Structures are given as C-alpha cells and as structure tokens.
Image (spheres, helix red, strand yellow):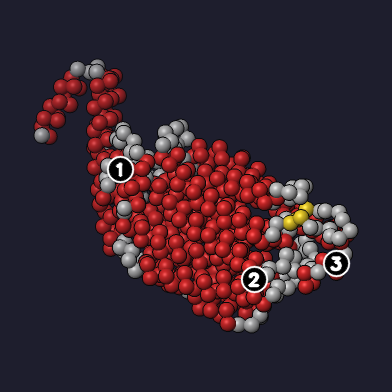
Amino acid sequence: MAKGEGAESGSAAGLLPTGILQAGERPVQVKKEPKKKKQLSICNKLCYAVGGAPYQVTGCALGFFLQIYLLDVAQVSEESSFSCYSSQVDPFSASIILFVGRAWDAITDPLVGFCISKSPWTRLGRLMPWITFSTPLAIIAYFLIWFVPDFHQGQTLWYLLFYCLFETLVTCFHVPYSALTMFISTEQSERDSATAYRMTVEVLGTVLGTAIQGQIVGQADSPCIPDGNASTVNRTQSSTSIKETQNAYLLAAGVIASIYVICAVILTLGVREQRESYETQQTKQMPFFRGLRLVMSHGPYIKLIAGFLFTSLAFMLVEGNFALFCTYTLGFRNEFQNLLLAIMFSATVTIPIWQWFLTRFGKKTAVYIGISSAVPFLILVALMESNLIVTYVVAVAAGISVAAAFLLPWSMLPDVIDDFHLKQPHIHGTEPIFFSFYVFFTKFASGVSLGISTLSLDFTGYQTRGCSQPARVKFTLKMLVTVAPIVLILMGLLLFKLYPIDEEKRRQNKKALQALREEASSSGCSDTDSTELASIL
C-alpha cells in the first residue's frame, strides 16, 4: 500500500517542472507533519467572555428591578384635585407583563435556534451575523422599556410590546453566543477554560448591572404613601420625586445600553468561529425537526435540563422578588441595592474557585455541594428577625451558591453535546438546538413563576407605593424567597442523581472525540493533497 502511494507520487513528480515541483511539495509536508492543536490565547478568551456581559447586565436589571418599577414607578402624571398619580400599572397588569414577556422570551429561543440552524456560513461565520445585526435594535427596545409614555391608556400594552421586542432581540444575541462555545475551539479543556472566563465576566456583568441600576435609582428616593392614603402626601412633592425616579431609571438604561454596544463590538472583533473538520465534509444540512427529535431523545440532555430547570427556577424566584422582600418584609427600603451588590460581588470572587473545584473533584460533585449550599442560608433568612448585619452575612454566603448556579449549566452542556456527537457522528448543526431549548425551558418556567408570584401579591392586597404592606403580603414574599426556592433546589438535586455523565464517562468521550477529529483531519488533508495535485497537473 505504502509502496503504491510512493510510486504514484514519484510518477506525478516526474511530470512536473522543477518550479512547480517545489510548489507541489507543500501538500506532502502537511501530510507528514501532524497538525498542531490551536490553543486559545488569553485575549481570545477575554473577548469571548465579554460577549456574555450584555445579556447578564440587562437581565439583572430587568430581573431585579422591573417588577418594582412597574408597581411603584411606571405612573403617568394626571392633574386633578383628587390625585396626582391615578394612572398606573396595577399588580394584575404587571403579572401579565412579566408572564407574557418571559413566556414569549422562552418561545423565541427555539425559533431563533431554528433560524440559526438554517443559516449559511458567511465570512463572519454562521453565528456572528446574528450578534452583530441584533445589537442596535436591542438597545433601542431596552431603553423604551424604562420610558414612561405620556398617555393614560395603553400603558400595559406599551411595556408588554417593548419587553417582548427586547427579549426577542437579546435572544438573537444570546442563543448564537451560547452556541459559540462549541465553535471557539475543538479542545474540551479550552472550552471549559473559556466557559470559566465567560462565567466570571457574566457574574461581573450582574454586579455591574446591579450597581448601575441600583445605585443610580437609589439616589432618587420617591416618598411612599403611609397606609395607602394618597392624601397624606403632598402632591407637588410626590410629582417631583416620582419624575426624578423615572429619569434615574432612564439614565441607568442609557448607561447599560452603552455597555451592551461596547461588549458586542469587542466580541465581534476578538472572536472567530471554527468549524469542525468532520463538519466541513457534511454537504447536506439536516432538517431542523429531525435534529430537534434527536436532541430531545438524548437521555443525558433531558436529565440535565430537568435538574437545572428546578435549580434555576429557585434562583429566579429569589431574583424576581428580592427587591420587594427587602423593602417590605425585612424593612430595608434603602439597602436592597447594596445587598444585591454583596451577593453578586461574592459570586464573582468565587467563580474561579468553583472552576478549580469542578476540575479537581468533578462537575456532579460541584453541583451537589455548590447549589445545596444555598439551602441553610435560605432557612436562616426564613427564621430570623430583621437584622441588617446578619442579612449582609447571608447575602455574601448566598453569592457562593449563585456562582455555582451560574457556572455549572454552561460547563456541563458541552459535555452533553460531545456525548451526542459520539452517538450521532454524522449529525451536525444541532448546537443551537441544545442551547436554545435549555434556555427555553428555563425562561418559560421563570415566566410562570414570576407571573404567579406577582399575581399572588395582588390577591393578598399589595398596596402600590405603600410605606408598608399587609401581613399577608409580607408572609407571601417570605414564602416566595425562602420556602419555595428550597423545595425547588432539593427537587433539582434529586434529578441530578440520574445524570449519567460523570468524570470517567467524560474522559472516555474526550478520547473518542479526539480520535474522530484526527481521523477526519487526516482524511481532509488527503483530499486536499489530491485536489491541489490535480489542479497543478
């Protein structure tokens, strides 16, 4: 066999002039020397990681502040002798906005994933054009969410429209960005390292979003209404204060929108997509619904998203109701933004520690220890009396668990995709489906939870802009922030017992995938040599 190949090479060389023969030697050198693995530089990883900040900065601001904004700030001035602010978003309308917005956001993830799977490869790649062209429209829609329209009818429609529009556009950014994990490198260790960079920057993004939104808005304190009696508050003073608060929200939105643009530019200029060697040989594109059927029948994927569905839902319940819980149940009206900063700063610091931990002890072990560590602190919050120092201690400790909840899903999804590629080696282009449907289930569940939690506040007698709330409202907020998340976390951890990819399985998959890539790369080199030689002849 080798002799035959050498004879063919010699006969071909005899037909070529000396100058062409020198040019023809290049393919032979490529075939003899194994191709070196390209590692990502720190600059590449940082540019990739920065791309995760826009979703987290805007998502943090919306998650922590949109509910209290709709209930207490989104009011239109109405000059009358009875009330200065009679046009406002009531709790029922706020629950509709939050539920429909999150539910629509969940639906757009698989839709965008479908469109991406049908997208052709361009000079920028297959994913980057979505990121680039969605950015300017997204920042306009985001700014208009925090703008109070000067009309008394249709406010609910206004906020619902621009909330859904922004969620659609940010999905066009985040789904391709999430799938980009599989295309920045073929090395599992490089992807894990880049994911750790990404999670660190994303948690920094939540800190930044919390700091910007919380500190700017916190400087404009509007007076509350004692016992829900609007006549006890001076109407002129109330009008001025609420307008200052609305302007503060707009200023924060402008700053966050600027950060969104800067991060998108850095991502676009600093990251290049890489295609798998065996994927370039795939000429026929797989139908989307066939890919969806294969993805949803992959056992490890179903078990992973089921576990993280419950744990993510627990943290989202805390996120959505934390501002109201601190304001009314704990009585820290002017401290909740600082408590949020404590949680997010603690999470940022501990992300590298969790990355080391999952590398040293395995990802399943990190899930059990990291996420369950939040349970004791949630129990402490449920049982203790209002104490600011203890609350700060609990906030710092809770940030450790938040860091694990941030890092682990996105670190484990690539392992599931690698396992799928081994079982379906000729199926390609399913990465957006994996990522988009994970986000779909998480967002849809969070939309249901936020809608129900806000609606429950309406049923228990929530008073808009009240200095205090009825005992039933305070109790409901405590249940939403402590008891319900504890139950969801425990259910999620039980489901993780069924997840089959442990460290031993992950190492086996890594070796098998490496062999597949080397085989495809060798085949690709052989095809390239034959094509170039035929062209020269």
Is disc 3 placed on a helix, strand or loop? helix
Task: Give the Cα distance between marks 1 and 2.
Answer: 52 Å
Q: How far across and how far down the image is residue 404, in percent? A: 47, 65
Mark 1 neighbour density, 10 Å: few (under 14) some (14–19) many (20 or more):
some
Of callouts 3 and 1, which one flags the residue occurring earlier in the amino acid sequence? Answer: 3
Q: Looking at the image, is mark 1 or mark 2 nearer the viewer?
A: 2
Question: Which residue is under mark 3?
Answer: 231
Q: Residue at x 57, y 53 (%)?
A: 100
Q: Residue at x 55, y 69 (%)?
A: 399
Q: Say the numbered circle drawn on residue 427.
A: 1
Amino acid on which disc 3 is placed: Ser
Front position in the image: 291 or 248: 291
The quarter of the rendered structure image containing the N terminus is top left
Q: How far across and how far down the image is residue 215, in percent? A: 71, 61
Q: Is residue 257 left or right of residue 368?
A: right
Q: Say the numbered circle drawn on residue 460.
A: 2
Task: Give the Cα distance between marks 3 and 2.
Answer: 23 Å
Of callouts 1 and 2, which one flags the residue occurring earlier in the amino acid sequence? Answer: 1
Residue 97 visible in image: yes
Amino acid on which disc 2 is placed: Thr
Q: Residue at x 24, y 27 (%)?
A: 530
Is disc 2 placed on a helix, strand or loop? loop
